[in-house]
Amino acid sequence: MTYEELCWEPIAALPEGEPETSFGGRWEDRLWLNVPGPFYTDIADNCWTGRLHAPRHVLYGGEYFGEYVYRQPATTAEVLNLVTAAQEDPYRGYACDGDSRWTPEAVRDWWRDRGRVTEYLESLLPTWSSSDRSDEREAAEGLRDFAAYITEGLGADLRKYLLRLEEGCYPKNSGPLPELR
């Protein structure tokens, strides 16, 4: 993950009028597949428009195959892509108050349970990869990307997020990071 500023603040990258205009998701209804971070979804649209705007951040899943955030944005452009995905959701199921909801222990719990996420991704991959529908085949690329991210990259990003939760800022240098355990 690269950061545009020494103390990257994703929420500060929201355009004027946000989050009030497009973000209405509720933590209590958060989809378990969302990775820890400021952005997440609850009961979001299942029209599969999120990947049109934020293909490296949004996937589809859960009981009704609604949208969820599988990679947190690391640049202003990525935040804006996620905002566009949120604006397309008629249920206003996206939220950006995760920083006030996630605790270090909850992040560690999510990480410990990542095998459940990986199993879920693996269960969808054969069907979506061989589907006659182009949107399912495209979403299969997202499944592969998320699975690869869990294997390499997400752990480091979550350690940086833990520091943010504990210290109020993403790391400014390559110093020690909290452990995920």
Image: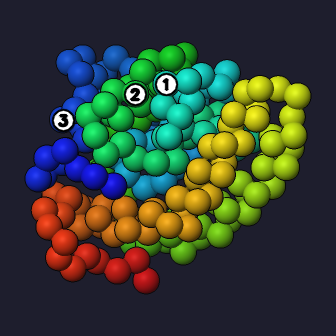
Q: Where in the figure is residue 63, as x and y percent of width and height?
A: 74, 41
Residue 43 seen in the figure: no
| Mark 1 secondary-structure assignment | helix
Of residue 5 and residue 72, the one placed in the foreground of this image is 5
Q: Where in the figure is residue 82, as x and y percent of width and height?
A: 41, 31
CA distance separating discs 1 and 3: 20 Å
State which tag comes first along the sequence, 2 or 3: 3
Quadrant occupied by the C terminus: bottom left
Q: Which residue is mark 3?
A: 12
Disc 1 crowd, CA 10 A, few/some/many (<14, 14-19, 20+): some
Contact, mark 2 vs mark 1 (Cβ under 8 Å): yes
Q: Which residue is mark 2?
A: 81
State which tag comes first along the sequence, 1 or 3: 3
Residue at the extreme bottom? 181
Q: Which residue is mark 1?
A: 53
Q: Residue at x 37, y 51 (%)?
A: 37
